[in-house]
Structure formats: structure tokens, C-alpha cells
Image: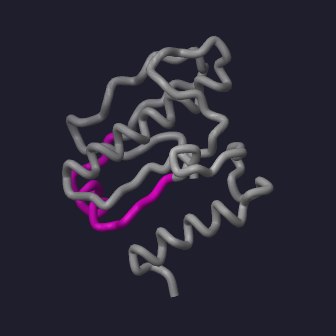
Amino acid sequence: MEPGTFPFPKGEVPEVEATTSPFPTPGMEVSDEEFQRLLKIPMVVYFGDNIITGSEPDKHWGLDNWRVRLNLARKWEQVMKKHGGDVQVVYLPDIGIKGNTHFLMADLNNQEVADTMEKWLKDKGLSK
């Protein structure tokens, strides 16, 4: 949930996006062997809705900090899928879930978020 960076194969790490945050968000280059192992694991990443979207930096660095992380997540998702990975980045408002902070499982709608996660696990055959 809302990680800070993502693993990319050699030569495919995107440029660091301009941000007002003092914490830029570089992708992480991993070896071909590590990347191939990651491609075998179904992955989902969730982001709450108190994140601004788009490509333009926001004057409030705290908001911009998460904007660039969400953008990097979407770039990672595209690269993973291009290489055959089973990856999904979920921005909760896009699926109709609103009112979340960075602490998705502590929010008042945590059951709705948990139900969404459980459905993903069942769809992937990963639940018992």
C-alpha cells in the first residue's frame, strides 16, 4: 500500500519527475534475475484519494510527494505488464472508494478497502 519506489529492469528506470518535495522519487534498478522473479508474482498496489494527480508539481510539497509516487507506480505498472507481469495499481477513487488517507487500513471505510483486497486475492487464487 502506497510504497515509495518501484523496481525496474536495467535501462528502463524512468527519469526522476520534477517535484517540490524534498524527497524525489527515483525508480530502483534491479538485476535481470531479480526482475524476472518479480514477473512471476501477481502484485497489486493501492493508493488512497488524498493524492493530487497530474504531471505538474504542486506548491505544497507534502501533496506533491505522493503525486510523484503515484505517477511512478503507474509507469512501473506499464513496464511490468510490457514484460508479462501481472500487476495492478489501484487509485481507490478510480474504483469508487473515497475518503482514504495514507493509512488505508486505519480509515473509517477500512472494511470496504479490505473487501477489495480480498476480492483481488480470491481472483488470483491466493486466498484460502
Residue placed at 39% from the left, 36% from the top?
A: 27
Residue placed at 57% from the left, 65% from the top?
A: 116
* 102 w.r.t. 123: above or below: above
Q: Is residue 96 left or right of residue 62?
A: left
Q: Is residue 112 left or right of residue 124?
A: right
Rendering coords of residue 123 (x, y %): 42, 74
Image-quadrant location for residue 34:
bottom left
Between 86 and 97, the one nearer to me in the picture:
97
Q: Which residues are magenta?
A: 29-45
Q: Is residue 22 left or right of residue 24?
A: right
Q: Is residue 42 magenta?
A: yes
Rendering coords of residue 126 (x, y %): 44, 79
**Number of numbered markers:** 0
Residue placed at 58% from the left, 50% from the top?
A: 96
* 57 w.r.t. 105: above or below: above
Rendering coords of residue 46 (x, y %): 54, 52
* 13 w.r.t. 40: above or below: above
Residue farthest to the right, as pictured: 108
Residue placed at 21% from the left, 52% from the top?
A: 32
Residue farthest to the front, as pictured: 96
Q: Is residue 109 magenta?
A: no
